[in-house]
Image: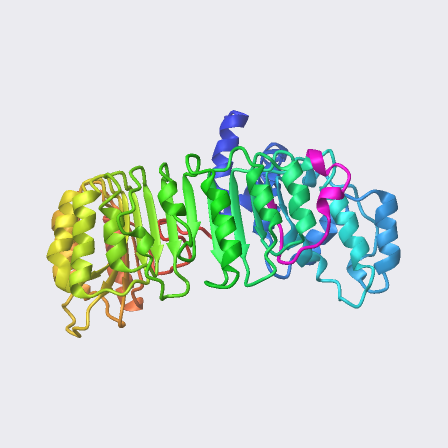
Amino acid sequence: MFKLNRDILYLILKELQDDKKSFYKCLLVNRTWSEIIIPILWKNPWKYLKKGNEKLLLNVIISHLSEESRNNLMLILSEHYNYLKGSYQKPLFDYISFCKHLNLNEIKRIINVIPDKIYEISIIRNEILKLFINENRVFTHLYIPHQFDYQIHLIPGAKVCLSELQLLRCHTTIDDKILTGLSEICKSIKKLELFIGWSNNKYGIVKLIENQKKLFDIRLNYYYSRANESFFEVLENSLIKYSNNIQSFKLTKQPITNILSSFVNLKRLELHDGFHYMPWNCLENLSLPFLQVLRAIGIPVKVLISLIENTSGHLIEIKIDDTIYSGINNAMLIQAIYKNCPNLSYLKLLVKISNKLEFEKLLINCQYLNGLFLILESYNDQSDIYDGLLKILAKSSPTNLFKFKFKFCYNRNFKSDSLKLFFDDWKGRHPMLLQCALNDDYYDLIEKYKAEGIIKRYDNKASYDDFEWIEKRV
């Protein structure tokens, strides 16, 4: 039997890791395949942890403890937990040695399968944390839960274990001593994601930020818009010091400072107004000449138009959600895109049917468009209201465009005859990837065009990312 080079096999299997069903089957092929797959699975085992499987993972983790530690836990917990009874075999692999993501949220979750009334739960936590945090482990990702107060930086070996940390996700309400301790250990964090609360935010996070040397990706998630504004201002000012380095930035409320205008080399910007009333005037006349990705949720259209007009033509991805449009504003936004984004590859946008001719100009001008996610809105209840749009897509779509998603407002949908004409007009082009919530009456129609090679894949679900056309199985 022909054998694949081990490195090539690794690259192939790595591509399958999000297809859990197929990935797990590959484990059973032979030992070589298992030796390749196990490290991939255990690099971040927490993302595969399904609800109800907490005890299984806890058992695997406990099996890595020393015999003395394990016996002590058995003695303490055996009367409460039958699943912890019995002899433990030494694992075939040192699974924990492959782990690069230390997720304290998930560790807390698996320990929580033990009732709170058992006071020895702290013993289990201590043993597990010492198993993960020691001088024989090196983590690149650390996730810390809300109001966490365990002094992990004081665990022997923490300085080695956490010294190469690249990502930190935490709440600004965790114990200040932990933040200060981590600031002395972790100096190479590249991506920092913060969850910022109403009160009790700790200024130790500022010291941690100031000690970083490679920070380029920041994500600020605010729970409240106005509380503790003095802390918000100090936090933003600490980040401005990295103005030349930051390339990716996420913000969930309008900033207090001029932080956005300072990020002159920004390539990716995500804005999410979860409070739905902020004017976001800071975006007006904001120049981000190197911006490539813009994702906006709940941001006023007028300021988005201004931002797009000042991006120097480098945008390759635009995603705009949950924004209130008038017909005129919708037309102006479409115009701003096709006049200023010649290199656009992916677009998610609401299109009012009254602006379908402006949308056609977008298709003609954005010749690199590869994926299109359209939110379609019309108050007209005529069943053929979308016929013209489908004709425009068939006629004017650029050669690269073959990935389509459609989402309808007000329970509208395409007519089957309109879809049939659209598919017929698509013959000879790249087979399309299509997602659209059609009912079972369309099944035969879709299958017909799949058989003819016009549709490569159809999905009527929405269980994957906006710009992920092939569903990630879960």
Q: Residue at x 77, y 46 (%)?
A: 63
Q: Which residues are magenta?
A: 142-160
Q: Quick check: 282 above or below 293?
A: below
Q: Nearer the viewer, residue 52 or 198?
A: 198
Asked if residue 149 can be seen in this view, the reply is: yes
Q: Is residue 267 left or right of residue 328?
A: right
Q: Nearer the viewer, residue 110 or 443?
A: 110
Image location (x, y in percent) of residue 113: 71, 62
Image location (x, y in percent) of residue 235: 51, 49
Residue extending farthest to the front is: 230
- Quarter of image, res 279: bottom left
Residue 151 lies in the magenta-colored region? yes
The image shows a total of numbered marks equal to 0
Q: Nearer the viewer, residue 324 or 119?
A: 324
Q: Is residue 283 left or right of residue 156?
A: left
Q: Quick check: 109 above or below 236?
A: below
Q: Nearer the viewer, residue 377 or 256?
A: 256
Residue extending farthest to the bottom is: 381
Q: Residue at x 13, y 52 (%)?
A: 360
- Quarter of image, res 440: bottom left
Asked if residue 421 can be seen in this view, the reply is: no
Q: Residue at x 33, y 44 (%)?
A: 293
Q: How is the image coloured?
A: rainbow
Image location (x, y in percent) of residue 152: 72, 46
Image location (x, y in percent) of residue 105: 63, 54
Residue 72 lies in the magenta-colored region? no
Q: Is residue 121 left or right of residue 14?
A: right
